[in-house]
Image (spheres, helix red, strand yellow):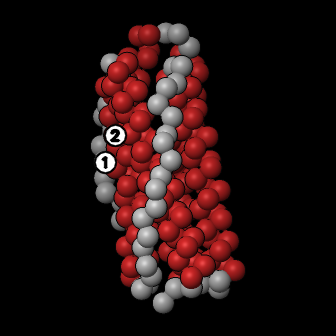
């Protein structure tokens, strides 16, 4: 069993993870339109990761005999002025997600739900990696400035990213 408050908090996070997935899908389209296939590939992997994050919460809620309720998600933005602005938006968004995960842990602590606190440790660690990944790409994009050749090298690098289904437990 899971408390109603915890159930509502998990459902909200499922919705927020699906928003993340849609936001990154919007960024896939942005980079595809620019012809930056490697950047688009990186975002495609991100879409898969966010969906996996949502499904991890979904399956956990079910395993606790909770009721999953799928909510409507807001329309994400679809235009950015340049790749750096887009990645800065990713970084900012991941910082927001970190605060949402921390808030979810706060609810678990208030509810004295030790199982949920333990389960959410994976998400806390994941956010450290998520923030580090996009912060590193932002730094590279700042470094290269208007160098188009260097941009294509980064595109090649990001094109090598592959999705590895996370084991969330
Ligand atoms: Fe990007 O980590 Fe989930 O939302």
Q: Are marks 1 and 2 in contact (CB under 8 Å)?
A: yes
Would you place residue 43 above or below residue 150 in this image?
below
Q: Residues within 10 Å of mark 2 (few under 14, many from 20)?
A: many
Mark found first going from the N terminus, 1 or 2: 2
Q: Position of residue 11 (x, y in %)?
A: 50, 68
Where in the figure is residue 102, as x and y percent of width and height? 64, 63
> SS of the residue at dot 1?
loop
Q: Is residue 148 left or right of residue 140?
A: left
Give the quadrant of residue 149. top left
Label 1 environment density (alpha carbons within 10 Å; few <14, some 14–19, many ≥20): few
Q: Which residue is mark 1?
A: 163
Question: Dot 2: what SS?
Answer: helix
Residue behind mark 2 = 44
Task: State the quadrant of the C terminus.
Answer: bottom left
> Residue 148, image x and y in percent?
44, 10
On the image, which quarter does residue 63 sit in? bottom left
Q: Mark 1 or mark 2: which is in front? A: 2
Left or right of 15, for residue 28: left
Gap between marks 1 and 2 measured at Cα: 9 Å
């Amino acid at each position: 069993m899971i408390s109603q408050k915890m159930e509502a908090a998990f459902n909200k996070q499922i919705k927020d993870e699906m928003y993340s997935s849609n936001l990154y899908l919007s960024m896939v389209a942005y980079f595809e339109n620019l012809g930056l296939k490697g950047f688009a590939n990186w975002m495609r992997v991100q879409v898969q990761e966010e969906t996996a994050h949502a499904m991890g919460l979904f399956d956990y809620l079910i395993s606790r005999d909770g009721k999953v309720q799928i909510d409507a998600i807001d329309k994400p933005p679809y235009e950015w002025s340049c790749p750096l602005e887009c990645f800065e938006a990713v970084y900012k968004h991941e910082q927001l997600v970190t605060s949402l995960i921390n808030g979810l842990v706060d609810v678990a602590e208030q509810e004295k739900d030790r199982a949920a606190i333990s389960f959410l440790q994976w998400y806390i660690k994941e956010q450290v990696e998520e923030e580090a990944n996009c912060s590193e790409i932002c730094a590279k994009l700042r470094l290269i400035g208007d160098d188009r050749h260097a941009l294509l090298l980064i595109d090649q690098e990001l094109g090598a990213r592959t999705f590895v289904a996370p084991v969330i437990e």
